Image (cartoon, rainbow, N blue to C red):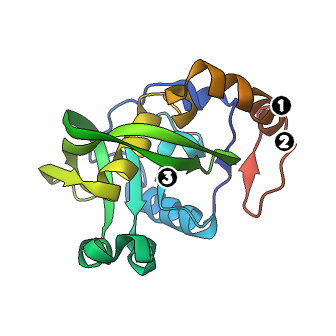
Amino acid sequence: MILPIRAFGDPVLRKVGKEIDKDYPDLQELIDNMFETMNSANGIGLAAPQIGLDIRLFIIDVSPLAEDEDYEDIKDELIDFKKVFINAKILEESGEEWKFNEGCLSIPDVREDVKRKSTILIEYYDENFVKHTETFSDIRARVIQHEYDHIEGTLFTDHLSALKKKLVKGKLTKISQGEVSISYKMRFPK
């Protein structure tokens, strides 16, 4: 089932997610719905707060990027990179900071350069509640960091300079009021 994506201004996007356990109601159905929702919106990541749930769950599927010539050198790593992250905790961020133009399904039509570290060490449970501790780099780390921010109540726009925040403020207000043209299902706070 395709779920409505919560728009900028919805209070759930500012909540720190709560941990869940393997008995969370209808977890596999929720995960399946999140992938269907993300895919219908042409996204590569989606966090539970974006569909109205303040829990520590996010999904990513960067396989569409394998077709992008910018990622030719890591194509093999991207082609099947589809993961579920439950109760994730970033243990370490390292490497050079690099700028990348980010966007967000909850903030349509706003894209800005965000600096993030190039490598992360993350601990998480998968959809079968198997615990993993893994290191990720490149665009995979970037997408994980972006989605991880969501379960911490942070949006990519929080990483912008004061000037950039002022420049996008009008767009953000319009999004929160539903004054945006989108091709996917959304729920607006006002």
Point out the image quarter for the N terminus: bottom right
Amino acid identity at mark 1: Lys
Residue 80 seen in the current view: no
Residue 8, quarter of the rendered image: top right
Mark 2 or mark 3, earlier in chain: 3
Residue identifier under label 2:
178
Query: Mark 2 falls on what kind of element?
Result: loop
Q: Position of residue 52 (x, y in %)?
A: 59, 40
Query: Mark 3 falls on what kind of element?
Result: strand
Numbered disc in front, either 1 or 2: 2
Q: Position of residue 39 (x, y in %)?
A: 55, 69
Tell me the CA gap for discs 2 and 3.
20 Å
Closer to the camera, 134 or 31? 134
Check disc 3: other Cα within 10 Å, few if <14, some if 14-19, many if 20+: many
Q: Position of residue 22 (x, y in %)?
A: 26, 48
Mark 1 or mark 2, earlier in chain: 2
Residue identifier under label 3:
46
Amino acid identity at mark 2: Gly
Residue 140 seen in the current view: yes
Closer to the camera, 65 or 61? 65
Badges 1 and 2: C-beta atoms under 8 Å apart?
yes
User: What is the number of callouts on the image?
Assistant: 3
